[in-house]
Amino acid sequence: MIQLLWFRNDLRLADQAALRAAAAAGPVLPVFVWDEESPGIRPMGSASRWWLARSLAALDAALGRLGGRLLVLKGASAAVLSRLAGEVGAAAIHATRQGEPWWPGVEAELGPQLRLHPGSTLHPPGAVLTGAGAAYRLFTPFARAHEAMGPPAPPQAAPSRIAFAPLPEAPPLPGFAPFWAAGFARAGWQPGESGAHDRLKAFLPRLSAYETRRNFPSEPGTSSLSPHLHFGEISAATVWHAAVGHVGEEAARPFTRQLVWRDFAHDLIRQHPDSAERPHRPAFEAMAWTDTAREPGRSWLRQWQQGRTGYPLVDAGMRQLWETGWMHNRVRMVTASFLVKHLGIDWREGERWFWDTLLDADLMNNAMGWQWVTGCGVDGQPFYRIFAPVTQSERFEALAYIRRFAPEYEGHAPVNPIVDHATARAAALARFRAISGERAMDKAGA
Protein backbone atom coordinates (compact mmCIF):
# COMPACT_ATOMS: atom_id res chain seq x y z
CA MET A 1 0.00 0.00 0.00
CA ILE A 2 1.01 3.63 -0.56
CA GLN A 3 3.30 5.21 2.04
CA LEU A 4 3.24 8.99 2.47
CA LEU A 5 6.69 10.46 3.07
CA TRP A 6 6.23 13.76 4.89
CA PHE A 7 9.23 16.03 4.37
CA ARG A 8 9.90 18.88 6.80
CA ASN A 9 13.40 20.09 7.69
CA ASP A 10 14.91 16.89 6.29
CA LEU A 11 15.09 17.76 2.61
CA ARG A 12 17.50 15.03 1.50
CA LEU A 13 17.59 11.48 0.17
CA ALA A 14 20.83 10.26 1.82
CA ASP A 15 20.79 9.18 5.47
CA GLN A 16 17.00 9.59 5.50
CA ALA A 17 15.47 7.00 7.83
CA ALA A 18 11.89 8.01 7.02
CA LEU A 19 12.55 7.56 3.30
CA ARG A 20 14.15 4.15 3.80
CA ALA A 21 11.25 2.95 5.93
CA ALA A 22 8.63 4.23 3.51
CA ALA A 23 10.41 2.74 0.49
CA ALA A 24 10.66 -0.65 2.21
CA ALA A 25 6.93 -0.73 2.98
CA GLY A 26 5.41 0.17 -0.38
CA PRO A 27 5.11 2.77 -3.14
CA VAL A 28 6.18 6.19 -1.84
CA LEU A 29 4.31 9.46 -2.25
CA PRO A 30 6.66 12.29 -1.16
CA VAL A 31 4.90 15.40 0.16
CA PHE A 32 5.86 18.72 1.71
CA VAL A 33 3.22 20.85 3.44
CA TRP A 34 3.67 24.61 3.49
CA ASP A 35 2.14 25.18 6.92
CA GLU A 36 1.47 28.54 8.54
CA GLU A 37 -1.84 27.46 10.04
CA SER A 38 -1.19 24.74 12.63
CA PRO A 39 -1.60 25.87 16.26
CA GLY A 40 1.55 27.38 17.72
CA ILE A 41 3.54 27.25 14.50
CA ARG A 42 5.94 30.12 13.90
CA PRO A 43 5.84 31.35 10.30
CA MET A 44 9.17 31.09 8.54
CA GLY A 45 11.26 34.23 8.14
CA SER A 46 11.64 35.96 4.78
CA ALA A 47 15.22 34.87 4.03
CA SER A 48 14.44 31.25 4.96
CA ARG A 49 11.57 31.24 2.47
CA TRP A 50 14.04 32.09 -0.30
CA TRP A 51 16.13 29.08 0.68
CA LEU A 52 13.15 26.76 1.11
CA ALA A 53 11.79 27.41 -2.39
CA ARG A 54 15.11 26.47 -3.93
CA SER A 55 15.67 23.52 -1.64
CA LEU A 56 12.26 22.09 -2.55
CA ALA A 57 13.08 22.50 -6.24
CA ALA A 58 16.39 20.67 -5.71
CA LEU A 59 14.63 17.86 -3.83
CA ASP A 60 12.01 17.55 -6.56
CA ALA A 61 14.78 17.29 -9.16
CA ALA A 62 16.57 14.60 -7.12
CA LEU A 63 13.35 12.61 -6.81
CA GLY A 64 12.81 13.10 -10.53
CA ARG A 65 16.10 11.38 -11.31
CA LEU A 66 14.69 8.32 -9.52
CA GLY A 67 11.36 8.52 -11.33
CA GLY A 68 9.35 10.42 -8.72
CA ARG A 69 8.13 13.93 -7.94
CA LEU A 70 7.55 16.01 -4.82
CA LEU A 71 3.96 16.99 -4.01
CA VAL A 72 3.85 20.43 -2.33
CA LEU A 73 0.60 21.36 -0.59
CA LYS A 74 -0.50 24.23 1.62
CA GLY A 75 -2.49 24.27 4.85
CA ALA A 76 -2.52 22.85 8.37
CA SER A 77 -0.28 19.77 8.20
CA ALA A 78 -2.50 17.31 10.08
CA ALA A 79 -5.61 18.17 8.08
CA VAL A 80 -3.75 18.19 4.74
CA LEU A 81 -2.00 14.87 5.36
CA SER A 82 -5.09 13.13 6.74
CA ARG A 83 -7.10 14.20 3.72
CA LEU A 84 -4.36 13.13 1.31
CA ALA A 85 -3.91 9.77 3.05
CA GLY A 86 -7.63 9.11 2.70
CA GLU A 87 -7.72 10.12 -0.95
CA VAL A 88 -4.86 7.85 -2.00
CA GLY A 89 -5.49 5.04 0.48
CA ALA A 90 -2.14 5.44 2.25
CA ALA A 91 -1.26 2.84 4.87
CA ALA A 92 1.11 5.09 6.84
CA ILE A 93 2.75 8.50 7.02
CA HIS A 94 6.52 8.50 7.57
CA ALA A 95 8.43 11.51 8.89
CA THR A 96 11.67 12.46 10.61
CA ARG A 97 11.40 13.76 14.17
CA GLN A 98 11.75 17.54 14.34
CA GLY A 99 12.83 19.75 17.22
CA GLU A 100 10.43 22.71 17.02
CA PRO A 101 7.94 22.72 19.92
CA TRP A 102 4.81 22.95 17.78
CA TRP A 103 5.31 19.60 16.03
CA PRO A 104 4.22 17.22 18.86
CA GLY A 105 0.73 18.71 18.84
CA VAL A 106 0.49 18.40 15.06
CA GLU A 107 1.81 14.85 15.15
CA ALA A 108 -0.69 13.83 17.83
CA GLU A 109 -3.53 14.77 15.48
CA LEU A 110 -2.28 12.25 12.92
CA GLY A 111 -2.60 9.38 15.38
CA PRO A 112 -1.17 5.87 14.91
CA GLN A 113 -0.88 6.26 11.15
CA LEU A 114 2.20 8.44 11.70
CA ARG A 115 5.58 6.70 11.90
CA LEU A 116 8.37 8.90 13.29
CA HIS A 117 12.04 8.20 12.57
CA PRO A 118 15.30 9.66 13.97
CA GLY A 119 17.75 11.74 12.01
CA SER A 120 17.68 15.45 12.87
CA THR A 121 20.48 15.31 15.47
CA LEU A 122 23.52 13.17 16.27
CA HIS A 123 21.63 11.46 19.11
CA PRO A 124 17.84 11.74 19.54
CA PRO A 125 16.66 14.60 21.78
CA GLY A 126 16.03 13.23 25.24
CA ALA A 127 18.57 10.42 24.85
CA VAL A 128 21.41 12.23 26.68
CA LEU A 129 20.46 12.15 30.37
CA THR A 130 22.11 12.48 33.77
CA GLY A 131 22.69 9.44 35.95
CA ALA A 132 19.41 10.28 37.67
CA GLY A 133 17.58 10.25 34.34
CA ALA A 134 17.13 14.03 34.15
CA ALA A 135 17.84 16.38 31.24
CA TYR A 136 21.01 18.44 31.30
CA ARG A 137 20.82 22.22 31.70
CA LEU A 138 24.52 22.99 31.16
CA PHE A 139 26.45 22.30 27.99
CA THR A 140 29.75 20.99 29.37
CA PRO A 141 28.29 18.01 31.29
CA PHE A 142 25.88 17.42 28.39
CA ALA A 143 28.84 17.26 25.98
CA ARG A 144 30.71 14.80 28.22
CA ALA A 145 27.68 12.52 28.47
CA HIS A 146 27.04 12.88 24.73
CA GLU A 147 30.60 11.82 23.94
CA ALA A 148 30.32 8.87 26.35
CA MET A 149 27.43 7.54 24.26
CA GLY A 150 29.80 7.05 21.36
CA PRO A 151 29.65 8.30 17.79
CA PRO A 152 26.41 8.65 15.85
CA ALA A 153 25.42 5.78 13.59
CA PRO A 154 27.20 5.84 10.22
CA PRO A 155 25.16 7.61 7.55
CA GLN A 156 23.19 5.53 5.06
CA ALA A 157 23.47 6.13 1.33
CA ALA A 158 20.50 7.33 -0.68
CA PRO A 159 18.41 4.55 -2.25
CA SER A 160 19.35 3.82 -5.83
CA ARG A 161 15.77 2.79 -6.68
CA ILE A 162 12.40 3.76 -5.20
CA ALA A 163 8.90 2.69 -6.23
CA PHE A 164 6.75 5.81 -6.37
CA ALA A 165 2.97 6.17 -6.16
CA PRO A 166 1.17 8.28 -8.77
CA LEU A 167 1.28 11.97 -7.90
CA PRO A 168 -2.10 13.72 -7.41
CA GLU A 169 -2.69 17.06 -9.08
CA ALA A 170 -1.91 20.10 -6.94
CA PRO A 171 -1.84 23.84 -7.66
CA PRO A 172 1.70 25.28 -7.77
CA LEU A 173 2.76 27.43 -4.85
CA PRO A 174 4.10 30.93 -5.50
CA GLY A 175 7.83 31.48 -5.20
CA PHE A 176 9.21 32.99 -2.03
CA ALA A 177 11.77 35.78 -2.18
CA PRO A 178 12.22 38.86 0.03
CA PHE A 179 12.81 42.10 -1.81
CA TRP A 180 16.47 42.21 -0.69
CA ALA A 181 17.35 38.64 -1.77
CA ALA A 182 19.37 39.48 -4.89
CA GLY A 183 22.64 39.15 -2.98
CA PHE A 184 21.92 35.65 -1.68
CA ALA A 185 22.72 33.96 -4.98
CA ARG A 186 25.73 36.23 -5.51
CA ALA A 187 27.05 35.02 -2.15
CA GLY A 188 27.42 31.55 -3.67
CA TRP A 189 24.67 29.71 -1.82
CA GLN A 190 23.43 26.52 -3.49
CA PRO A 191 20.35 25.29 -1.61
CA GLY A 192 19.75 21.55 -1.84
CA GLU A 193 21.43 18.28 -0.99
CA SER A 194 24.15 18.47 -3.63
CA GLY A 195 24.99 22.02 -2.56
CA ALA A 196 25.34 20.81 1.04
CA HIS A 197 27.75 18.06 0.07
CA ASP A 198 29.74 20.44 -2.13
CA ARG A 199 30.10 22.87 0.78
CA LEU A 200 31.18 20.09 3.14
CA LYS A 201 33.75 18.87 0.61
CA ALA A 202 35.13 22.41 0.23
CA PHE A 203 35.42 22.81 4.00
CA LEU A 204 37.23 19.58 4.85
CA PRO A 205 40.68 20.78 3.66
CA ARG A 206 40.35 23.70 6.12
CA LEU A 207 39.16 21.55 9.02
CA SER A 208 42.57 21.14 10.66
CA ALA A 209 42.78 24.94 11.09
CA TYR A 210 39.22 25.28 12.43
CA GLU A 211 40.15 25.66 16.10
CA THR A 212 42.68 28.44 15.48
CA ARG A 213 40.96 30.35 12.65
CA ARG A 214 37.21 29.98 13.15
CA ASN A 215 36.93 33.30 15.03
CA PHE A 216 38.54 35.36 12.26
CA PRO A 217 35.76 36.79 10.06
CA SER A 218 38.13 37.85 7.29
CA GLU A 219 38.98 34.20 6.64
CA PRO A 220 36.89 31.22 5.46
CA GLY A 221 37.49 29.45 8.76
CA THR A 222 33.99 28.12 9.35
CA SER A 223 32.02 25.53 7.39
CA SER A 224 29.01 27.75 6.46
CA LEU A 225 26.94 24.56 6.62
CA SER A 226 24.32 26.00 8.96
CA PRO A 227 21.56 26.62 6.36
CA HIS A 228 22.05 23.13 4.93
CA LEU A 229 21.91 21.57 8.40
CA HIS A 230 18.82 23.59 9.35
CA PHE A 231 16.87 22.42 6.31
CA GLY A 232 18.19 18.89 6.70
CA GLU A 233 19.82 18.81 3.27
CA ILE A 234 22.66 16.95 4.94
CA SER A 235 22.48 15.01 8.18
CA ALA A 236 24.51 15.95 11.25
CA ALA A 237 25.81 12.36 11.29
CA THR A 238 27.11 12.73 7.73
CA VAL A 239 29.00 15.88 8.68
CA TRP A 240 30.36 14.30 11.88
CA HIS A 241 31.66 11.18 10.14
CA ALA A 242 33.14 13.16 7.25
CA ALA A 243 35.04 15.41 9.67
CA VAL A 244 36.30 12.54 11.81
CA GLY A 245 37.21 10.52 8.75
CA HIS A 246 39.22 13.41 7.36
CA VAL A 247 41.39 14.36 10.36
CA GLY A 248 40.59 11.87 13.12
CA GLU A 249 38.27 12.17 16.11
CA GLU A 250 40.56 14.20 18.37
CA ALA A 251 41.57 16.74 15.70
CA ALA A 252 37.95 17.07 14.54
CA ARG A 253 36.59 17.63 18.07
CA PRO A 254 36.62 21.47 18.03
CA PHE A 255 34.34 21.28 14.99
CA THR A 256 32.22 18.26 15.97
CA ARG A 257 31.64 19.92 19.34
CA GLN A 258 29.59 22.50 17.46
CA LEU A 259 27.35 19.67 16.26
CA VAL A 260 27.03 18.56 19.89
CA TRP A 261 26.02 22.14 20.79
CA ARG A 262 23.32 21.85 18.14
CA ASP A 263 22.07 18.68 19.86
CA PHE A 264 22.11 20.57 23.17
CA ALA A 265 19.98 23.35 21.68
CA HIS A 266 17.45 20.76 20.52
CA ASP A 267 17.43 19.28 24.02
CA LEU A 268 16.96 22.67 25.70
CA ILE A 269 14.02 23.59 23.48
CA ARG A 270 12.25 20.50 24.79
CA GLN A 271 12.74 21.83 28.31
CA HIS A 272 11.92 25.44 27.39
CA PRO A 273 9.60 25.45 24.36
CA ASP A 274 9.04 29.21 24.72
CA SER A 275 12.76 30.01 24.46
CA ALA A 276 12.25 32.59 21.71
CA GLU A 277 9.86 34.57 23.91
CA ARG A 278 10.81 34.07 27.55
CA PRO A 279 14.20 34.12 29.29
CA HIS A 280 15.19 30.94 31.05
CA ARG A 281 16.18 33.07 34.05
CA PRO A 282 12.95 34.77 35.26
CA ALA A 283 14.84 37.70 36.83
CA PHE A 284 15.50 39.04 33.33
CA GLU A 285 11.79 39.67 32.83
CA ALA A 286 12.29 42.69 35.11
CA MET A 287 15.14 44.15 33.04
CA ALA A 288 14.56 47.82 32.15
CA TRP A 289 15.08 47.56 28.40
CA THR A 290 15.31 50.58 26.13
CA ASP A 291 11.86 51.47 24.76
CA THR A 292 12.01 50.97 20.98
CA ALA A 293 8.62 52.63 20.50
CA ARG A 294 10.19 55.95 21.48
CA GLU A 295 13.39 57.85 20.74
CA PRO A 296 16.25 57.20 20.94
CA GLY A 297 15.41 53.48 21.10
CA ARG A 298 13.46 53.54 17.84
CA SER A 299 16.38 55.03 15.91
CA TRP A 300 18.95 52.83 17.66
CA LEU A 301 17.15 49.67 16.66
CA ARG A 302 16.85 50.81 13.05
CA GLN A 303 20.52 51.87 12.91
CA TRP A 304 21.59 48.51 14.33
CA GLN A 305 19.46 46.66 11.77
CA GLN A 306 20.87 48.72 8.91
CA GLY A 307 24.51 48.59 10.04
CA ARG A 308 24.80 52.31 10.83
CA THR A 309 25.95 52.27 14.46
CA GLY A 310 29.36 53.87 13.84
CA TYR A 311 31.18 50.75 15.03
CA PRO A 312 32.93 49.15 12.03
CA LEU A 313 32.71 45.49 13.06
CA VAL A 314 29.07 45.77 14.12
CA ASP A 315 28.10 47.52 10.92
CA ALA A 316 30.01 45.09 8.71
CA GLY A 317 28.27 42.17 10.40
CA MET A 318 24.79 43.59 10.02
CA ARG A 319 25.41 44.41 6.38
CA GLN A 320 26.82 40.94 5.72
CA LEU A 321 23.58 39.57 7.14
CA TRP A 322 21.43 41.76 4.90
CA GLU A 323 23.48 41.17 1.76
CA THR A 324 24.19 37.45 2.08
CA GLY A 325 21.60 36.04 4.52
CA TRP A 326 24.36 34.85 6.83
CA MET A 327 26.77 36.25 9.40
CA HIS A 328 30.07 34.94 10.79
CA ASN A 329 29.49 33.39 14.22
CA ARG A 330 32.01 35.55 16.10
CA VAL A 331 30.37 38.64 14.61
CA ARG A 332 26.91 37.32 15.56
CA MET A 333 28.04 37.40 19.18
CA VAL A 334 29.47 40.92 18.85
CA THR A 335 26.40 42.37 17.10
CA ALA A 336 24.02 40.66 19.53
CA SER A 337 25.95 41.87 22.55
CA PHE A 338 25.97 45.39 21.11
CA LEU A 339 22.19 45.43 20.74
CA VAL A 340 21.52 44.08 24.22
CA LYS A 341 24.29 45.70 26.26
CA HIS A 342 25.39 48.83 24.40
CA LEU A 343 21.90 49.85 23.30
CA GLY A 344 19.98 48.18 26.14
CA ILE A 345 17.44 46.76 23.68
CA ASP A 346 15.50 43.61 24.53
CA TRP A 347 17.20 40.51 23.11
CA ARG A 348 13.87 39.40 21.63
CA GLU A 349 14.01 42.29 19.16
CA GLY A 350 17.28 40.91 17.88
CA GLU A 351 16.05 37.32 17.83
CA ARG A 352 13.11 38.36 15.66
CA TRP A 353 15.36 40.31 13.27
CA PHE A 354 17.71 37.37 12.86
CA TRP A 355 14.71 35.06 12.41
CA ASP A 356 13.58 37.13 9.43
CA THR A 357 16.94 37.78 7.80
CA LEU A 358 19.02 34.63 8.39
CA LEU A 359 18.98 31.84 5.83
CA ASP A 360 19.81 29.47 8.69
CA ALA A 361 17.10 30.82 11.02
CA ASP A 362 16.85 27.76 13.23
CA LEU A 363 14.52 28.22 16.22
CA MET A 364 16.69 26.19 18.59
CA ASN A 365 20.06 27.71 17.68
CA ASN A 366 18.79 31.27 17.24
CA ALA A 367 16.91 31.41 20.54
CA MET A 368 19.70 29.71 22.46
CA GLY A 369 22.32 31.99 20.91
CA TRP A 370 20.47 35.13 21.93
CA GLN A 371 19.83 33.83 25.44
CA TRP A 372 23.51 32.87 25.75
CA VAL A 373 24.77 36.32 24.72
CA THR A 374 22.26 38.08 26.95
CA GLY A 375 23.09 35.87 29.91
CA CYS A 376 19.44 35.00 30.51
CA GLY A 377 19.74 31.38 29.36
CA VAL A 378 20.30 28.45 31.68
CA ASP A 379 23.82 28.14 30.26
CA GLY A 380 24.42 31.72 29.19
CA GLN A 381 27.52 33.85 29.63
CA PRO A 382 27.39 36.35 32.53
CA PHE A 383 25.55 39.56 31.61
CA TYR A 384 28.53 41.61 32.71
CA ARG A 385 30.65 40.11 29.92
CA ILE A 386 30.26 42.85 27.35
CA PHE A 387 31.92 42.42 23.98
CA ALA A 388 33.94 45.51 23.10
CA PRO A 389 33.58 45.90 19.31
CA VAL A 390 36.96 47.57 18.80
CA THR A 391 38.83 45.02 20.91
CA GLN A 392 37.08 42.16 19.13
CA SER A 393 37.83 43.65 15.73
CA GLU A 394 41.51 44.06 16.52
CA ARG A 395 41.94 40.71 18.26
CA PHE A 396 40.39 38.78 15.39
CA GLU A 397 41.96 40.82 12.58
CA ALA A 398 38.67 41.87 11.03
CA LEU A 399 39.91 44.73 8.86
CA ALA A 400 39.55 42.90 5.52
CA TYR A 401 36.04 41.82 6.57
CA ILE A 402 35.14 45.41 7.46
CA ARG A 403 36.49 46.73 4.16
CA ARG A 404 34.38 44.21 2.28
CA PHE A 405 31.04 44.94 3.93
CA ALA A 406 31.50 48.46 5.38
CA PRO A 407 34.17 50.00 3.12
CA GLU A 408 33.71 53.57 4.37
CA TYR A 409 35.64 52.66 7.52
CA GLU A 410 39.43 52.88 7.38
CA GLY A 411 40.18 51.02 10.61
CA HIS A 412 38.79 49.35 13.73
CA ALA A 413 37.87 52.54 15.60
CA PRO A 414 34.31 53.89 15.72
CA VAL A 415 33.32 56.88 13.63
CA ASN A 416 30.45 59.04 14.92
CA PRO A 417 29.15 56.18 17.11
CA ILE A 418 25.53 56.28 18.22
CA VAL A 419 26.62 55.43 21.79
CA ASP A 420 29.90 55.68 23.68
CA HIS A 421 31.33 52.30 24.69
CA ALA A 422 32.30 53.24 28.26
CA THR A 423 29.02 55.04 28.95
CA ALA A 424 26.92 52.24 27.47
CA ARG A 425 28.86 49.64 29.43
CA ALA A 426 28.27 51.47 32.71
CA ALA A 427 24.55 51.73 31.95
CA ALA A 428 24.38 48.00 31.17
CA LEU A 429 26.02 47.08 34.47
CA ALA A 430 23.63 49.37 36.35
CA ARG A 431 20.70 47.73 34.55
CA PHE A 432 21.98 44.32 35.63
CA ARG A 433 22.49 45.41 39.26
CA ALA A 434 18.87 46.50 39.37
CA ILE A 435 17.59 42.98 38.62
CA SER A 436 20.29 40.87 40.23
CA GLY A 437 20.30 42.38 43.70
CA GLU A 438 24.06 42.14 43.77
CA ARG A 439 27.07 44.10 42.61
CA ALA A 440 27.85 43.42 38.98
CA MET A 441 31.45 42.46 38.43
CA ASP A 442 33.43 45.35 37.00
CA LYS A 443 35.32 43.57 34.24
CA ALA A 444 36.75 45.11 31.13
CA GLY A 445 34.92 44.47 27.88
CA ALA A 446 35.82 41.22 26.19
Image (cartoon, rainbow, N blue to C red):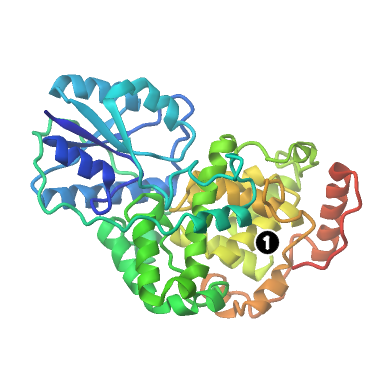
Q: Report whether residue 237 is seen.
A: yes
> What percent of the width, then of the height, locates residue 115?
29, 32
Residue at figure coordinates x 77%, y 43% from the top left: 289
> What percent of the width, then of the height, locates residue 317?
57, 64
> What percent of the width, then of the height, locates residue 36?
40, 31
Front residue of 7/151: it is 151
Q: In the rendered image, which quarter contains the N terminus? A: top left
Question: Which residue does the numbered mark 1 point to in the structure image?
Answer: 309
Residue at figure coordinates x 62%, y 77% from the top left: 396
Residue at figure coordinates x 49%, y 34% from the top left: 101
> What percent of the width, then of the height, locates residue 220?
46, 75
**Which corner quadrant of the image does residue 158 belong to?**
bottom left
Does residue 72 appear left or right of residue 435 in this picture?
Answer: left
Front residue of 347/85: it is 85
| Secondary element type, mark 1 | loop
Q: Compared to 78, does 374 lie above or below?
A: below
The three-letter code of the residue at mark 1 reads Thr
Q: Report whether residue 403 is seen.
A: no
**Which corner quadrant of the image does residue 295 belong to?**
top right
Does residue 37 appear left or right of residue 134 in this picture?
Answer: left
Q: Residue furthest front?
A: 131
Q: Compared to 203, does 299 lie above or below?
A: above
Q: In the rendered image, which quarter contains the C terminus? A: bottom right
**Which corner quadrant of the image does residue 205 belong to?**
bottom left
